[in-house]
Every structure is written in C-alpha cells, then in structure tokens.
Amino acid sequence: MSTRLFSEDQLEQLRSFPDIGRDDLIRFFTLTPADVAFVDPGHGRGATDRLGLAVQLCTLPWLGFVPDEVSSAPPVAVARLAERRGVDAAMLEEYGRREQTRTDHLRSVVKYLGWVHASPGSAAFKELEQFLLDRAMEHDSPTLLFNLAREYLIAAKVIRPGVVTLMEMVGTARKAATDLTHETVADLLTEQVCSDLDRMLAVDVGRGMTPLAWLTTPAVEATAKSVKATIEKLEWLRGMDAHLLDLSALPTERRRFLATVGRRSTNQALERRDPERRYPILLAVAAQSAVDLLDEVVALFDQAVSARESRAKIKTDEALVERAKKGETRQLLMDVILPVLADPSIPDEQVGGLLRERIGMSRLRETVAGEWRPLPKDHGRLSAMHASYSYLRQFTPNVLAAIDFQGGPGTADLMAAVAILKKLNAGGGRKVPEDAPTSFVPARYADYLDKARKTGDDTSFRHYWELCVILGLRDGLRSGDIFVPGSRRYADPSTYLYTPEQWQPKQAAFCTLVGKPATAADALAQGKEELHTALAELEKTLAGAAPDDTGAVRLDGDDNLVIPKLTAEDVPAEAGELKDELAGMLPFAPIASLLIELDVRTGFLDCFTHAGGRKQAKSAELKRNILAVLIAMATNLGLARMSEACGVPYDVLAWTMEWYVREDTLREANTCIVNHHHGLELAGVFGGGTMSSSDGQRFPVRGKSTTARQMPIHGGKVLSTYTHVSDQHSTYGTKILIPTQREAQFILDELLGNATDLPIDEHTTDTHGVTLINFALFDLVGKLLSPRIRDLGKITLVRDDTPTETAKRYPHAGPLLGARWNEALVADCWPDLLRMAGSLKYGQATASLVVGKWSAASRQNTLAAALKEWGTLRRTIHAAKYLSDPSYRRRIGRQLNKGESLHALRRDLHYAQQGTITTPHLADQTEQAWCLTVLTNAVITWTTEYYQLAVKNLRADGRDVPDELLAHISPAHSENVNFFGVITVDVEAELAKLDGGGWRPLRPAAVEPSLRP
C-alpha cells in the first residue's frame, strides 16, 4: 500500500538533493567558526575530505538526512562552501570513493550536531510513531503525513529513516488511526444506533433516494415549503438522537475528514466498507448534518421573513410615490386657497364662492373624493407586511416548535412573547393574553397595536403582535441577542471568544504580536498620540489652503469641508508603449498548455489530494483530468461540454471533481501559485505584497438558489463573488456572498486566514467596507484599514476634549470634530476588547460572525458599544490622514484600481453560457469560484513570468527598462491566452514543447521609436 504513495521518479527525488533557494542557501550553507574548526582540525584531512565533510555538515540540518551521492549536492551550495574554504568545488567529484570515509564522516557530523538515529525500537522511533498516530487522527492524507514527519524529524534532530521505511510507518499510522477512531466511538455504537445508521443507506421508496442523500442536499430557495422540508430533515436526525452525539473525543480535523468522505461516497461504496470504517463515517455525517440543518432552518427562516419584509417595503415605497403625486395636487390647491384666506379685503361670505369659481367644482369634488389619511410612523410598512401574514403562518409555527431559541441580556420580554406565541400555536389559541408583553415592539409599530387594542379588534392585535414577535426574533438572531444552543452560526456570541481563563496566558504574547498595550491607560495614551499627530497634519493642510484653491482640501467661506477629486495619476506614456511591446513578445498559449507549463514550475497540481486520504502518484492521466475539471468550472463550460471539448468521458470528469477538486484543495493550489508569484522579481516591482483590497463582482444566476437575489440594477438575478487582491495583482481570497449582504462583514476573514506568503498588513476597500466595528478590529489585530469613503465630509469625527479647548488647539480642524470620544467606556472594556481581538487572531472565532453580530448588536451590548467607540477613534485618525496626505489617497486609489482591473480578466475567463451560474448550492458555487480564482492567478503568474523574461531579454540587448515604468504595467490581461475551441489536455505533449529551461520561446520584440536606446 505504502509503496504506491510515490512513483519511482518521486522516490528517487526524495532520496536525492533537491534544488535550493537563496534563503536556504544562506541559512544552511554558512559555516560558523565552530563548524570551520570541526571541518578543518588542522591535521589529517585533505581538501577533498574537508569539502565533502562540510557538505554533509550543512546538508543534515537542511534535509534531515544526507543523500548517498554527496557529490550531487546543488552546485551553488558546493561553490559557496568551496569559495569560503578556498578550495576548488570540482574536488567534490572525488569525495567518497571509499564508502567507509563517507560513513565515518556522517557519523562524526551526527555526533557533532547532536542528532540521533531513529532505529526500530529506539525512543526516537517510538516518539515518531506516536507523532504520526496523533497527526493521522487529524489528517488522513499520506503525503501530508509524510511531509509532517520530515518536518518533525528535523525539528527533533532525528535522522530521517529510509523513504520506504517512513512510508510504511505512515501506512501503519493511518491504519492505527482508523482502529483508534472506531475504538473512540465504540461506546456510541449501540445496536439501535447502528440500526439507525444503516437505515441512512437504505433507499426510501417515497423519496426515491437514501436518507443520506436526502439529508445532505441543501435547500435551493427560502420558501415556506423549503423551511418545512428542512425541519423535517432535522426532526429525522433528532429521531435518531444525532443532535446528542458527542464526537468531541475525535479531533476536529478527523471529524471533518470522516464527514467529507461520507458526503462524497456513493451508497454502494459505504455499504462495501467494513463496519469499523463505515459506522464512524456515518456518525460524523449524522452529527455534522444535525448542526448544519439546524443552521439552515434558522437561515431559511431569516431569509423567508426578510423576503416578505422587502416585498412590503417595495409596496410601501410605491404607495409613497403615488401619495406624493396626490400630495402635489393638493399642494397646488393650497396655493390657490391660502392667498384667498389670507387676504383681509375679501369678505368671509365671498370666500367660498370665490374659491369654487377659481378652482372649479369638478376639481374640488375630485380632490375631496380622494381619501387622504395621515401616515403611521412606519409609513404603512407593517400594514403592507400584514398581507403576508397567512404565508408566514405556513412555516413560523413550525420553526418556533422545532428551534430552542434562547435570549441574552435585555431580551426577557421578547422571549416571554415567543413563549406565549408557541403556546398559542400549540393550543390553537387566537387571542393574545392581556398581560402579553409589548415593550419589545419598536416605536414605529406601536400605534398598530394601540389602535387594535382600543377598538377591541383582537384579530388585528394578534396579527400585528405576532408579526412584531417574528421580526424581533429575526433581528435578535442577527445581533446575537437571541441565540440557538447547538448551532454554529447562531450560537451564544460569548462562546465565540476565549473565556477570561483561557485568554489570560495568551494576552502578553498577543499584545506583543499586534503592538497593543495590555493596560487601558497605555492604550488610551497611544490612541490619543496617534489622534493628535493626525489632527496636527490636517490642521496644517487646512490652514495652508485658500478658500478658492479648487485643487486642495480646504474650508470654504462658510467653514464647510471641501474635498476635491484627485487629479488623474500621471502615468508616463512610455509605460503604455512598454506594456504593448512586452505583450507583443509573449508567446501564445491555450489555457490548458499554460496550466501544464505552470505546474512544472509550481507543482500546484500536487495539492489536489483524494478526499478519502489516498494520495495517488500524479499520473499524466490524473493531471489531465484535474486540469479539465478546473478549466470546465472556471470557464463555466460545465463538465458535459468540457467532455465534448477535450474528449475525456463525463463520468471520469465527474468522479475527479467529486474526489479531488474541493474547496480545501483549491485553496491549497491557489496558495501554491500565489507564493510562486510572490517570489518573482517582477511581482516585487508591482508591489511589496503588504497591501490588498477587496471588492465584490456580480455574476448572473439561472434557476433557484438561496445565494441569489433579483437586482434590476445588475440585470436580474445575481450572486456576488467577493475577492481579496494583493498589490502584486494576485488573488488570495474568494467567497460567495448574497449580493444584498453588506460586504464589510467578510473583509477580515481572508486577511486573518491568509495562508500565503504575502505579508499583508494594510487593506483598502470602497465605502462598502467602512464600519466602526471593522475600523476597531483591524487595529486591534494589528492590521490597518485604509478605505476610500464616499461623502467623507459628512461622517462624525471625534475629539478627546471640550469643543472650546479643541478649537484653541486646532482652529481649522477643531470645528470638524463633532463628538467627544467616550474614553471611559473603552477603558472599562479594554481587557475584553483584547480578548475579542485575540479570539479572532488565533482562530478561535470567525471574523465574519463577530463583525455581523456586533454590528447589529443592541445598545445594551456594552462590549459592542466599546468596540464601536474605539472604531470612531480609528476612523477619525484615518480621515485626518486621508485628507491631509494626497499620496496616501493616491495609494489607496491605485490599489482599488488593481482589484477592479481583475474583474475584466475574470469575465474573459468565465465566458461560457454568458457567464451565468447554473449551480444552485453554495458549496458548488464556492468551488466554482475558487476554480476561477486559481485560473485567474495562473494567468497572472504566467504573464508575469514571461513579462520578466521579456524584460530580461530587452535589458540584455542594452535597453533601459526602468522599474518605475514596470510598476505601471498590469499582468491582468488575456490576449495571449486562448480559452475557446477544442481544448486539448495532453500533459506529456505540452511538456515536450518547452525548452531545456521549461519555457516557451518569446516572440521578437517590436521596438517603439520612443523606447529605442
């Protein structure tokens, strides 16, 4: 089994010297004075032996072992050592002619460095076995386990066993992990539980599918029918006590792996597995599905209620437009009536006749006939929503009966109302009790209940009161004031964070990591210092700008802030000419050929591991299939059309996508490509990789989907892909969003989860990312939020002193600071603010959950209020800097333009079916979005590589190609890449087209006259 982990070529590579990078070269092949003394003791050792010994001495800490052919060490490493020892590097060819010499030297190196052998039965061997077992409980990928073992051995200073031995140990650990998994859950596998699990694999004649397939198929629309169907699934699982299954004894990664295998396996494949493997898989699926379905019920409830509220809003807005038209008619009448009434010269007895004469009886009768009632406080929205009362009643009683809603502080009356409503639903009651609470009802809706109560209309009171309960419950779930035990998305917000006891030992290290003081006093002092530094610059800018200086940020004659648009950035004409020339030198390549070529240099296809943990050697056929799936999904061709285009059978492509192309493997492959791009010299010219931006892009959707919404401004039903783009033009984050969701909630997720080598420390967005919560959290986790804010002059800026004192200190900027910062609130909550930020930084909580809950939190939530207060300070500092520093504004605008420039490339790639998404489920949409991201980065990286080659050739010919011009060139174009027609994915044939260095030949340069030397 283990010997099939790697091909013969890969085994040989693992036993030999790999290529070495610059960092490793400097780190490992630099001898200390002690090393020099060890290598050259001054007697009895010739130059050849000294060089060979030095190579072994440097290789062991680098690789964890020393290959047999020491003379095959990387030439650059040998040359470095030879140069520093003053010997000829060619001498290494003569080293080790006697095997005993090489062995004796290695033994000396091992003793000198303090390493040990992992011989069978030794303590080191047993510790390695335990390490592999522990990791196998978390990860089942044999290649990953092999690599983890190599890293562990180097860290522990244990010489790596032979490749075959280590593979056998990995196989043993995987088998032991399977056995241990079964032993861990054995107590749960009672006869009844096993029977219930087996029932999940039996085809239900009524549904035409197995319960497993039924349970794992999510809803595609938020309707009453979908809500009830999802509740039925939840109740089915509760009937087998799936919600009570405690699998916490298994590592989280193990549970995730088992559930993934269960969801992706066919019914027949699961039935063929031994019970020791089948039952743990089904247990994990059942337990995870119970949580997923609970979240899905609440999410569908939210969406279904919100859809009816949105419909009521549209209806109300339309009614207000009509009312405005009628109001205009009445206003015109008043323009005739009021002058007559106000004229004292017209006798009272003549007023009526005069008005009837001037206005006309027909017009008066028409106006009087039109009913004109005063508007309620909400302009009639709740009344419009009342039209949906019967529809809401189709599912809201089911939701209340199925979900155990719990309330936090300040929700006692709402929860009492929920309990009363549940009781009325259960007993068929119609009348709301007289003592039913109403304090939770918003003031804008209170008149509806008061009027119904006064008129004795119990039916209307019940309807409006119930609607207020449902809306209050929905809003409470969004803010976190209402939570659902056992849920993941709607759990008690306090459980997202470290407890004070868990946080205490982590606080000092966290504060050092993010550069924040541990004490409130120091934090306030630090914040005030930044505030006054920024305000001083703003004061200087405003004081130096004349009121008529139209190009400067200034105060006008009425002391109003005027923010002019920045003039267009002065991009040299030579930059455009250079880009055209470089693009003309790039070779033409079909998309499949591009990906095959890029895999040679990055190995990104190795990231696509089998979901069942079996890491097969990447044969040319398997690589072909993975590439075909990537192209099919990214271009939106779909597997059926791709099968026709490339000749690979549809069922082969479907199997490959099911087991190899998943979100986690796509993320890993994308990280591999981004890291490679980050290491390119030209990418460093584009940017340092320290800044990024995020933006949403709309794609049309066909059919039903819970992530799509009708948006006439975008041409119909659409969803949004939210991407994070670095200043090097690479995309390191992708997420599918409902297009009506505010994107600010999801900005931090990808930054904190950034697994690439990009050292992102600053992020910019447009106004969509600007919330006080984000300003605060970015600062608290050690990042900088630098957004471009629309209508910046209208936001509230804060001061830390009285208006009088602030105006004395900042005569021009002071009047702009409209509110005082609440220092006391921040000081009281500072330890908890750090605890919240640490919970996000260390992955205890998901940023989007925290941002969403605390952004919608009620005023009673002190921690949320303190977070927003800190956000007002950070926003004021940013605004002052933004207004006073044009270069800062330009840098933000330049990065936002980089992000937006990739939209066109994604559109070009995602061309089939007019770019319309046809997959209904979020998981499938997410995988397709990541396929598009991988291909987008592949094109960016390939183009950057060939731009770099072209620049190198031009410079070799004596051309002056300054980096200042290259910084204005974007690799986000696809003119040299063909996505259309017959797609041939022939790995071996494409590799044969590359030259000895793995490159395609550049086309001859067409020199522009202005660029000639």
Image: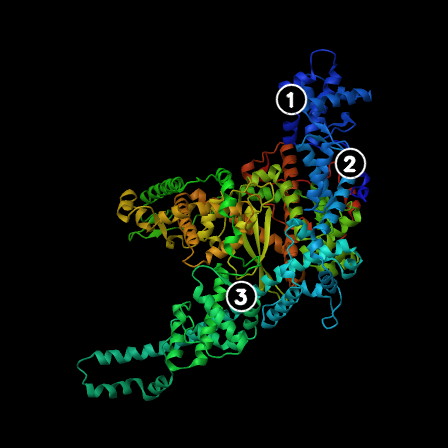
Q: Earlier in the sequence, mark 1 or mark 2?
A: 1
**x and y percent of residue 135 in the render?**
68, 43
Secondary structure under tag 3 reads: helix
Q: CA distance from mark 1 to mark 2?
A: 28 Å
Ranked by sequence position, the earlier of labels 2 and 3 is 2
Image quarter in which the N terminus is found? top right
Picture residue at 53% right of the left edge, 52% below the top: 496
Q: Residues within 10 Å of mark 3 (few under 14, many from 20)?
A: some
Mark 2, secondary structure of its residue? helix
**Front-most of residues 771 and 352:** 771
Q: Position of residue 754 (x, y in %)?
A: 58, 45
Q: Which residue is mark 1?
A: 31
Choose top left, top right, bottom left or bottom right for residue 928. bottom right
**Is residue 657 toward the left or the right of residue 429 in the image?**
right
Name which residue type carries label 2: Val
Question: Label 1, label 3: how many angstroms apart (C-alpha)?
Answer: 65 Å
Residue density around tag 1, few if under 14, some if 14–19, many if 20 or more, within 10 Å:
some
Q: Residue at x 74, y 69 (%)?
A: 204
Q: Marks 2 and 3, Cα distance to the nearest angstrom?
A: 54 Å
Q: Amino acid at mark 1?
A: Leu
Residue 894 lies, with reference to residue 128, above or below; the image says: below
Find residue 820 and report its horizontal and vertical position in percent. 33, 50
Instruction: From the image, tell me which residue sits under label 2.
Output: 163
Instruction: Tell me if I can see residue 985 in this picture.
Output: no
| Residue beneath disc 3 | 302
For the view shown, which residue lies furthest in the top direction?
43
Q: Considering only vertical position in the picture, is 19 above or below 326?
A: above
- In front: label 1 or label 3: 3
Q: Residue farthest to the left?
A: 345
